[in-house]
Amino acid sequence: MKISVRVKPNMKEEKVEKEGGVFTVCVKEPAKEGRANKAVVELLSEYFKVPKSRIVILSGMKSKQKIIEIKDYKFIAL
C-alpha cells in the first residue's frame, strides 16, 4: 500500500491525522540528519500496527511531502 504523507517537523505533539487521501504526520524531531524521517517511520509503524522494517520512504527524503510504502499491509478501513 502506498500513501501520501505531509510531514510537520518541530511540533510539540506527535500525531498522525488523515485528511482525505493524505496523512499528516507531526513529529517532535527537527528535519536534520534524517531524524524527522526516522520519527515518521516510527509513528506510522505504531499507527498501522506494522513493524518499522515494512515501512519504506519511496520519495521525498528531503521534502515535507513524501510517498511511503507499507509492505504487505492488509488494508482495513481506518
Image: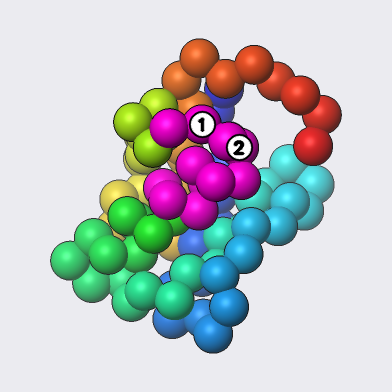
**Magenta region: which residues?**
41-51
Q: Position of residue 67 (x, y in %)?
A: 47, 39
Tally the numbered discs: 2
**The C terminus is located in which quarter?**
top right
Q: Position of residue 43 (x, y in %)?
A: 50, 53
Q: Which numbered tag is attached to residue 48?
A: 2
Above or below for 20 versus 13: above
Residue annotated with mark 1: 50
Above or below for 71 versus 33: above
What residue is shown at x 80% (from left), y 47% (from top)? 20
- Does dot 2 land on a helix, a strand or a loop? helix
Pick the front one: 22 or 26: 26
What residue is shown at x 54% (from left), y 85% (from top)? 12
Mark 2 nearby-residue class (10 Å; few <14, some 14–19, many ≥20) = some
What residue is shown at x 76% (from left), y 24% (from top)? 76
Q: Name the amino acid type tagged 1.
A: Val
Q: Name the amino acid type tagged 2.
A: Phe
Q: Position of residue 8 (x, y in %)?
A: 51, 70
Task: Check residue 45 for magenta coloring.
Answer: yes
Question: Disc 2 versus disc 1: distance between alpha carbons?
Answer: 6 Å
Above or below for 50 versus 21: above
What residue is shown at x 50% (from left), y 62% (from top)? 7
Mark 1 nearby-residue class (10 Å; few <14, some 14–19, many ≥20) = some
**The N terminus is located in which quarter?**
top right
Q: Position of residue 77 (x, y in %)?
A: 82, 29
> Is 59 displayed left or right of 16 in the figure?
left
Pick the front one: 6 or 71: 71
